[in-house]
Structures are given as structure tokens and as C-alpha cells.
Image: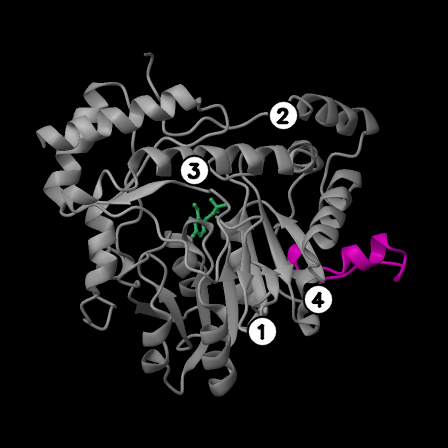
Amino acid sequence: MSRLAFNKPYVSGKEYEYIADAVASRKLSGNGKYTQKCHDFFRSQYSFPFCLLTTSCTDALEMAAILLDIQAGDEVIVPSYTFVSTANAFVLRGAKVVFADSRKDHPGMDEDALEALVTPRTKAIVAVHYAGVACDMDTIMDVAARHNLFVVEDAAQAIDSFYMDRDGTKRPLGSIGHLAAFSFHETKNIISGEGGLLVVNDPSFISKAEIIWEKGTNRTAFYRGEIDKYNWVDIGSSFLPSEIIAAFLWAQLEKMDLIQARRLHIWNEYHRHLNGYVDAFGIKTPLVPAHATNNAHMYYLVFDNVDQRTRVTEQLKSENIDTVFHYLSLHSSPYYKKKHDGRVLPCSDKYSDCLLRLPFYFDLTDEEIKHISSRLISALNHA
Ligand SMILES: Cc1ncc(COP(=O)(O)O)c(C=O)c1O
């Protein structure tokens, strides 16, 4: 079998047509027809009150930090087991990041240990929906309400995933916190190469979000004909993507149901081949708690120890199967370890050492999934 890559970006085939249409229309900068189509899609599909395409999830998180008016010395609670942008966006504004550990049964942050991290300087909590699996948002929103904090959902991996709240209502991820950020990086379910989305659920942030998006100007209001010239009215940056990116994204959004159905099938196939078979080696398959749906963003295994993971990874690599680790704990990163308050975060470290992601992309065939799973079990038997 030829090399099995970890990721192969999905292409629907309509991308070129929509990009050609954008080019022919001679409207290539941001906030044109395709940007509006994407905004309308997200608003109607997930009932987001307001959203803005961005050039990445990193940018959407940076916009969130500006919107929350994060100042030097403010504290923001962030999981340690996450991508650097979850923390960096707030550090850029001068925040002190207070790292939360992960849950024992899931790489997402331990919601029950959150309140102990709140101090009078805490301004926000960033909830990362790891693997597209919802955090316990009722617990997080309760802590935030009790201490008057903002909640930002880092929904980078969580498109088309839902949370069942304690009243039994199924709520789209990204619609629960004050703000939320999604990624359309080429490794995600829905892609535009690089790309992202800021969701504004708290209406008090809407007009400022538009200004930050457009370099600190009120150009968006000007384009709507609400003012006769636009001006510099606040801080901001160039957060909006070009129409070429939006046209690409639109071609993917049209295929959302197809993409999601295929990815769920792939996830279920992996689970069928591995769940119940890897347990004997002390390995855990992914948990999807009762409050969460599965958007099939990734299939991962949590190994018993780092040596076991290394041996299996190397064996699979020698057989042309690419697997990848995920995050390295941010609290012990070269940039932040001296600034960290010294708490040991054993669960985050465990996932850094022991979690492995298996190849996962739309075009992966059932035969390839079976092959990867059986080679993995064989590698375990020899590890
Ligand atoms: C949890 C999380 N947040 C933020 C990001 C950053 O996304 P982007 O690459 O779109 O900036 C990622 C990237 O994978 C991520 O996993």
C-alpha cells in the first residue's frame, strides 16, 4: 500500500469555479458576495447572531482579546493542552495566562477544577472544545456568571458539533460563550487553506467587532451607506480574508453534510477496529461524553506511556503510515515555563506524551482504515 499521509485536504471541485467567478467579478478584497454567502450560511445553520470571516482562528482569537479589552495584568484561564494561539492571542495584549489541567478521561480542560483558578484579576476563560467534543459548558458558564467573567469558545476543531445543555437543549458549539473562534486551516473538517470565523454572541460587541475587523475603521458601515466617509475610530488590524478565500470556503460549506457524513463513517470504522482491541495494551480510545456530539474531527488514542507511543509510531512510519502527536503542554513551553506559576499539570503532560492522532481525511478508504488499524495492533504486539 502506498504511503498513508496524516492529512489530505478535501476539495469539492467547485472551488475553482467560485474563485473564477470572484476573479471575473473584479471584487477580490474582503467582505464581498462570497463573504456574505458564508456569513449567511453560518447565521442560518447555527443561529449565530453575528459572525465575521477571518484569515485564521488565531486572528479570531486575537480579535476576541481586543474585544474583551484585555489589559496588562489581566488573567485569562486557558487549558495547557491546546494550540499556542489559544494563549498567545491574550498574551499579545499583556494578559497573564493561568493554565488549567485537562480532564483525566478527556484532553479537554477539567471544568470542575476551574473555579479554584479564579482570582480578582481573572477576566476570561477560554474553553477549547478538543477534537470537536464539547466542554461541559453549563459548568463553565456558571463559574463565569458567578465571577463576572467572559467566556471565549476556542472552537477551532468544533465546526458542526453540539452541546446538550442541562435543560436538554442541543446547542451548536460556538453559540454559547460571549465570543467564539473557528478554524478552516487545511487540517480541519471544512477548510479554506488558512481561514477562520469569529462568532459574536454578546450583541454589545457587534459594532466594535466590525471596526476591529477593518483595521480600526468604520469602513463596513461606510460600505452599507450608513456614513459618508470612513475614519480611524479604534484599534484594529487586517483580519478579513479576501474574496478568493471566501469563494473557496463557500465551495466547502455547500458540501458540509457530505463531508460530515463521510468523516463520521471514518471515525466509526476506526472505533469498530480498535475499541475493545487496544484496551488490553493499556490504551484508551476517544471519549465522547453524554453532553457532546461527535463531529469526527479526529481519531486519537491515548497510549499507556511515551515509550510505547514512540515504538508504535516508529513502526507505523516504517510501514508508510503517518501518525502525529498533538500539543506539547504550554505551561512547560520554552516561552511560558518561567512565567507559569509552577503548578504541576499531570493530565496535560500525559496527553502531550501519550496521545497519537491517526490518519484522518475524507478520501481515506475503509480498506485503508482496516489496514492502519491492523498494523497498529500488530505494532502493539511487538512494542
Ligand atoms: C485549539 C486550537 N485553537 C486555535 C488554533 C489555530 O487555528 P488557525 O491555524 O486557524 O489559526 C488551532 C489550530 O489547529 C487549534 O487546534
Q: Is residue 331 left or right of residue 381?
A: right
Q: Is residue 148 above or below residue 54?
A: below
Residue 226 rendering spot, x and y as whole percentages: 89, 61
Residue 279, by quadrant, is top left
CA gap, disc 1 and disc 3: 28 Å
Quarter of the picture holding the N terminus: top left
Judging by the rendered image, the residue that carries numbered circle 2 is: 12
Q: Earlier in the sequence, mark 2 or mark 3?
A: 2
* Kind of residue at badge 4: Ile
Instruction: Using the image, tell me which numbered label, if any, was put on residue 268.
Output: 3
Q: Are marks 4 and 3 in contact (CB under 8 Å)?
A: no
SS state under label 2: loop
Question: Counting other residues with Cα less than 10 Å from the Cα at mark 4, is it few (<14), some (14-19), or many (20 or more)?
Answer: some
Q: Earlier in the sequence, mark 2 or mark 4?
A: 2
Q: Earlier in the sequence, mark 1 or mark 3?
A: 1
The nearer-to-camera label among 2 and 3 is: 3
Judging by the rendered image, the residue that carries numbered circle 4 is: 206
Q: Is residue 283 visible?
A: yes
Q: Are marks 2 and 4 in contact (CB under 8 Å)?
A: no
Residue 59 rendering spot, x and y as whole percentages: 54, 52
CA gap, disc 1 and disc 2: 38 Å
Q: Residue at x 51, y 58 (%)?
A: 61
* Kind of residue at badge 1: Asp
Q: Is residue 248 above or below residue 214?
A: above
Q: Earlier in the sequence, mark 1 or mark 2?
A: 2
Quarter of the picture holding the C terminus: top left
Give the prevailing secondary structure in the magenta stretch.
Answer: loop
